[in-house]
Image: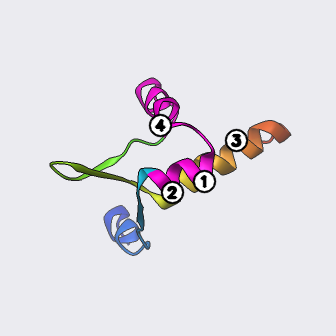
Amino acid sequence: MTAHAATSQLPRCFIKLVEVKALTTLSTSEIYRRIAAGTFPAQVTLGPKSVAWLESEVHKWCEDRIAARRGEAA
């Protein structure tokens, strides 16, 4: 199985900024600051005035924060 085939089988779910903020408790400005710093998943452009995030990437970011607190390898 190719890498493309493997990723195309994964379920994808887009979430909007309101849900990203609810999941992370970060403010809008902090989310964009961390995106610019490369420490938070970047948004996906859906259209000229619409962006969203991959839910799985945001959840992974949250899990990585928990693992870091515990001193575990992410």
Query: Which residues make up the magenta segment?
Result: 18-40
The answer to which quarter of the image holds residue 54 is bottom left
Q: Residues within 10 Å of mark 1 (few under 14, many from 20)?
A: few
Mark sitting on residue 65: 3
Give the Cα separation between the discs numbered 1 and 4. 12 Å
The residue wearing badge 4 is 28
Q: Earlier in the sequence, mark 2 or mark 4?
A: 2
Q: Which mark is residue 19?
A: 2
Instruction: Tell me if mark 4 has few (under 14), some (14-19) or many (20+) residues whose alpha carbon lies within 10 angstroms of its own.
Output: few
The span from disc 3 to disc 1 (Cα, nearest Å) is 12 Å
How many discs mark residues in the rendered view? 4
Q: Residue at x 63, y 44 (%)?
A: 25
Cα distance, mark 2 to mark 3? 18 Å
Q: Quadrant of residue 52?
A: bottom left
CB contact under 8 Å: marks 2 and 1:
yes
Location of the C terminus by quadrant is top right
Indicate which disc, 1 or 4, sits on the residue closer to the N terminus. 1
Distance in Å between CA atoms under marks 4 and 3:
18 Å
The secondary structure type at the circle numbered 2 is: helix
Disc 4 to disc 3: CB gap under 8 Å: no
* Residue 23 among magenta residues: yes
Q: Going 76% across and 44% down the picture, which residue do you hit?
A: 67
Distance of mark 2 from mark 4, alpha carbons?
11 Å
